[in-house]
Amino acid sequence: MKACTHGVLAFFDDLEQAPWNLIAQIQDNCLSLNGVVCRSCGEACDDSVIRFKLEIGGKARPLLDETECTGCGECIAICPTQSIQIHRLPETAVTEAQASVGGAKQA
Ligand code: SF4
Ligand code: SF4
C-alpha cells in the first residue's frame, strides 16, 4: 500500500486497517426465502460469496459468507426486491476479518 503515488492513502486513517469495512446482508423479503425461485444475487457475485441451501417447502435460504464479502455492491442492483442492504462492520469485526484473511494467507 505504501507504494501508491496517487494520494489515495490520505483517505485511510490507519494504514493497517482492512481496505473495506462494508458487508451485504440479505433481508427477510428475499424472494428465495419466500419460496420464489431467484438466484440473481448469487450469480452476480464474482466471488461466489452467496450460496443457497435448499429447505423443505421449496425454499432456498441464501447464505452470505461474511468473511468473504467485500461490500462491493454488485448483488444489490440486481436484486428485484431490494432485499440486500450494505452495512458497515463494527471495528472489532473488521479486525477479526483481517485476522481471518491474514490467517488464510499464511495457511
Ligand atoms: S436477488 Fe434478492 S430476491 Fe433474489 S435471492 Fe438474492 S436477495 Fe433474494
Ligand atoms: S457485496 Fe459484493 S462480494 Fe458481497 S455478496 Fe454482494 S456481490 Fe458478493
Image (cartoon, grey):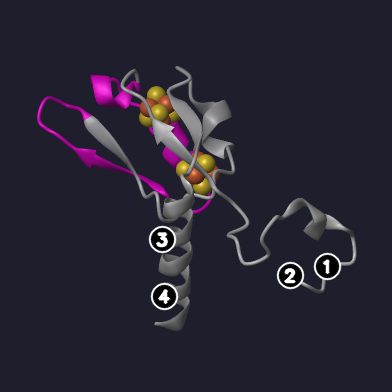
Locate residue 25, reporting x and y percent: 41, 34
In this view, the mark in front (3 or 1): 3
Residue 29's x, y, as percent?
34, 18
Tell me if label 2 and label 1 are in contact, CB under 8 Å. yes
Residue range (magenta):
30-59
Between the C-alphas of marks 3 and 1, the distance is: 26 Å
**Mark linked to residue 4:** 1
User: What's the amino acid at mark 4?
Assistant: Gly
Residue 34 seen: yes
45 relative to 78, above or below: below
Q: Which residue is mark 2?
A: 1
Query: Is tag 3's residue or tag 2's residue first in the polypeptide sequence?
Result: 2
Dot 2 or dot 4, earlier in sequence: 2
**Residue visible at 39% across and 33% down in the picture:** 39
Residue at screen point 49% across, 50% down: 91
> Could you give the CA–CA distance between mark 2 and mark 1, rounded to whole angstroms?
6 Å
Q: If you read the primary sequence from the N terminus, does the residue marked by circle 3 or circle 4 appear first?
A: 3
